[in-house]
Amino acid sequence: MRSRNGRTRRNPPLFAALNIARMNTTTPPNDDTALPERFSDLALDARILRAVSDMGYEKLTPIQAKAIPLLLDGRDIMGAAQTGTGKTAAFSLPILQQLMPLASTSVSPARHPVRALMLAPTRELADQVYTNLKAYAKHTPLRCACVFGGMDMNPQKAELRTGVDLLVATPGRLLDHLEAKTVNLSQVQFVVLDEADRMLDIGFLPDLQRILGYLPKQRTTLLFSATFSPEIKRLAQSYLQNPLLVEVARPNATATNVEQRVYQVDEDDKRATLVQLLRDNPLPQVIVFVNSRLGAGRLTRALERDGIKASAMHGDKSQAERLTTLEAFKRGEIQALVATDVAARGLDIAELPGVVNYDVPFNAEDYVHRIGRTGRAGASGLAITLATTRDARALADIEKLIKRQFEKQTVSLERASRPRRDADETRERRMPREPRAMTAEGQTPAPAAPRAARSSRHDPWFDKPYEADPNAQPPWDATSPMPAASGVRSASPSIRPRRKIAALLGGHEPK
């Protein structure tokens, strides 16, 4: 644990247990104080309220009503809420409000140092946070920027050199800018770790520790996520000062407005089941989650062959391709977005009707984030999971996490809609096409003769076994060489003539 002077010291086990127990205790606002219900009830600047009104927000969500008053008091917060409940606004609006006295219209970069840093595990989540943050601050002089990997660093460097008040970044790309000395974090007052559990899952803990080492010791640190694992609480113990745990629902709970279905299927019938479910259920758009990048590409091609407009999004695609695919999906040009867990966080698609877990996730926490892509902002949603016998253990972990038992259903596949080809048909399709016959005039091609007619013209000579000619003379018995062609130079005298076969068998060369 880091002390006030910046040194690292170890906590005795007893004190460590006391600290964790203290953080596990929810500290809501005073019960005598009524929670605000509308954004207009908050002590926010008129320009911020105007931006919120432009976005159509009026009522506060539970996490916003509990967290915003505490953040306005400058407390460190651990916010636990379900996905799609407005966590971004819960930490963005108080930060903007507290930075308003420092806002400047000057064009000098020195008047716009980085005062708030927001870290996100994925590019999509960073871009989503930046989009909302920019909308909240559009009527203020505060400048916002976003940096993440997969894009050219030069435009990002140019933007950072002009001065940025609020910076949204992924850990890897932020370290690149720190090493290039294009960003200075010495004046950061607010740090937000959004979806910190995901950052730990994908191995960002060393990067987080390096980044936090660049920050001032006196700062406000906020940690928001839909799931809180023991590792997250240990991270909060090291880098947060007396944090308040704000929960608006049971930890790792799923939204009540999302209908969850689990279908027991065979491994060979998963794709056919998915196609039939997409056609039977009113799902004009759906995100299909798989566990591997290779599986995403294969499933996308299979859905395209079945007449479903699909596209893949995973880590092997460039950031430009991922953004293009995401924009096409938001415009409704794609029905099925086949994605890995890179899309499980940060994708905020308005009124997405449902998601499908084509593969049961390896981590139970990822299930909560996957189905959180639907049923956002109070809308209803549908979450379908296709489980095979191999997924029994992973499914049991999910049930244990969300404290809910799934009622497994089955699907009756319409086998008649796609009859299997018999062996003769398959062999017939694989045989090369025969050339079409031409008429006597050579103008209009005539259809090829049927197979029975072609077999009647078969020459039986080709069916005879090989018979050697008894009168044929073997080539090695030839006594006279072949006459040289006229005008052709003879072989070089340095080339040794070929020996007769008789000599090879022990005979004598002719003299």
Image (tube, grey):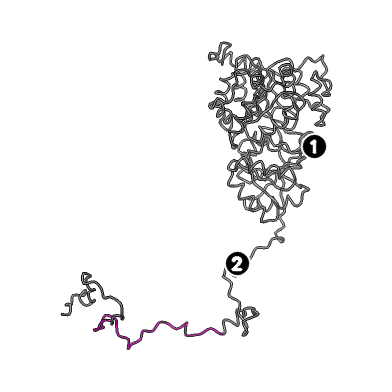
Q: Is residue 444 above or below residue 18?
A: below
Work out whether residue 140 or residue 271 is closer to the camera in this orientation and state it. 140
Q: Is 370 in the magenta?
A: no
Q: From the image, which quarter does the N terminus lie in? A: top right
Coordinates of residue 328 in the picture (x, y in percent): 71, 45
Amino acid tagged 1: Ala
Please name the residue shown 58% across and 74% down the image: 434
Work out whether residue 346 or residue 159 is closer to the camera in this orientation and state it. 159
Please name the residue shown 29% across and 82% down the image: 474
Please name the residue shown 63% across and 83% down the image: 439
- Does residue 50 appear to the left or right of 163 in the view shown? right
- The crowding category of the residue bearing disc 2, from other C-alpha atoms within 10 Å (few below 14, some 14 to 19, many at least 20), is few
Q: Which residue, given by chain and number where applicable, does mark 1 sit on? A: 379
Amino acid tagged 2: Thr
Q: Is residue 240 above or below residue 507?
A: above
- The crowding category of the residue bearing disc 1, from other C-alpha atoms within 10 Å (few below 14, some 14 to 19, many at least 20), is some
For residue 233, the mark is none
Coordinates of residue 204 in the picture (x, y in percent): 57, 29
- Please state which of the two labelled residues, at mark 1 or mark 2, is closer to the viewer: 1
Secondary structure mostly seen in the magenta stretch = loop
Where are the magenta residues, as a range? 457-481
Work out whether residue 137 or residue 219 is closer to the camera in this orientation and state it. 137
- Does residue 156 appear to the left or right of 485 in the view shown? right
Coordinates of residue 166 in the picture (x, y in percent): 67, 24
Q: Which residue, given by chain and number where applicable, does mark 2 sit on? A: 426
Image quadrant of residue 441?
bottom right
Residue furthest bottom as drawn: 471
Residue furthest top as drawn: 5
Q: CA distance from mark 1 to mark 2?
A: 48 Å
Q: Earlier in the sequence, mark 1 or mark 2?
A: 1
User: Which structural element holds mark 1?
Assistant: loop
